[in-house]
Image (spheres, rainbow, N blue to C red):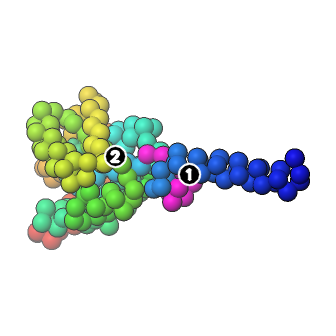
Amino acid sequence: MAGGQFVGVLACNWAFVFATIVTIIPESETRLPRRYRGVTAIYPGSFDPITNGHLDLIQRGSRLFDRLIISVLRNEAKQPLFSAEERMEMLCEVVDEYSNIEVDSFHGLLVDHARTHSATVLLRGIRAISDYEYELQMALMNRRLNPGLETVFLLANEAYSFISSRLVKEVFSLGGNISGLVPPSVEERLKRRMSKLRKKGA
Ligand code: ADP
């Protein structure tokens, strides 16, 4: 085979190999930076404030998915105790050691937010039957809005299944002990916020 022909055959083969690789890797994957290839999951919630129940779910989610984004819902209608910025700060403080976890916020449709991150999974937790009904409704609606987005439920750790942000705030405001229910940095913030509110009220 002449030199020119040999180079031509080689180039042809490489073009075939390249085309095959591009076909195997979906387009959305090739556009992502290398470290983000794989499954991106979004863990949405109010996190007002983050509890050890949330944290347990986050730790397990970070092992299951390549990238986990904790997305704070900006919904002022819910009259949160902490602003979205404060909730994000508290989250960042406690997930600092995890290299595949990010924290952000969103408003509007969760499916749109997931699309902007090329996320294919929504992570949610189930503590009891009472969570299931609401979560089922949300998951089915999100599936209708975007069939490519899968909701994955993790069962709450039995040690934390009774914890909710609402109950923690209620117990703390009445002087109850909440150590072990929220990270220490969150307990400190709660102390400061409650004493500020009491001074305002006095
Ligand atoms: P939302 O306002 O969306 O319910 P939350 O911050 O209360 O936001 O909860 C976010 C998600 O975390 C929900 O799926 C909820 O079921 C889950 N979750 C909340 N507390 C716990 C807990 N103690 N253990 C496991 N999952 C939890």
Residue at the bottom extreme?
200
Q: Please report the residue visible at 48 percent of the width from the left and 55 percent of the height from the top.
A: 27
In the image: residue 177, left or right of residue 98: left
**Residue 150 position within the rendered picture, expressed as x and y whole percent measured from the top left:** 29, 44
Please check the rendered image and state whether residue 14 is part of the magenta-colored stretch, yes or no: no
Q: Secondary structure at mark 2?
A: strand
Identify whether 79 is placed above or below 52.
Answer: below
Main SS of residues in magenta:
loop
Q: Secondary structure at mark 1?
A: helix
- Three-letter amino acid code at the position of disc 1: Val
Q: Which corner quadrant of the image does residue 52 belong to?
A: top left
Count of numbered tags: 2
In the image: residue 163, left or right of residue 59: left
**Alpha carbon separation for disc pair 1 and 2:** 24 Å
Tell me where the magenta segment starts and ends, as one range.
30-39
Q: Please report the residue visible at 29 percent of the width from the left and 35 percent of the height from the top.
A: 154
Q: Say which residue label 1 marks.
A: 22
Q: Please report the residue visible at 15 percent of the width from the left and 71 percent of the height from the top.
A: 200
Q: Quadrant of ligand 1?
A: top left
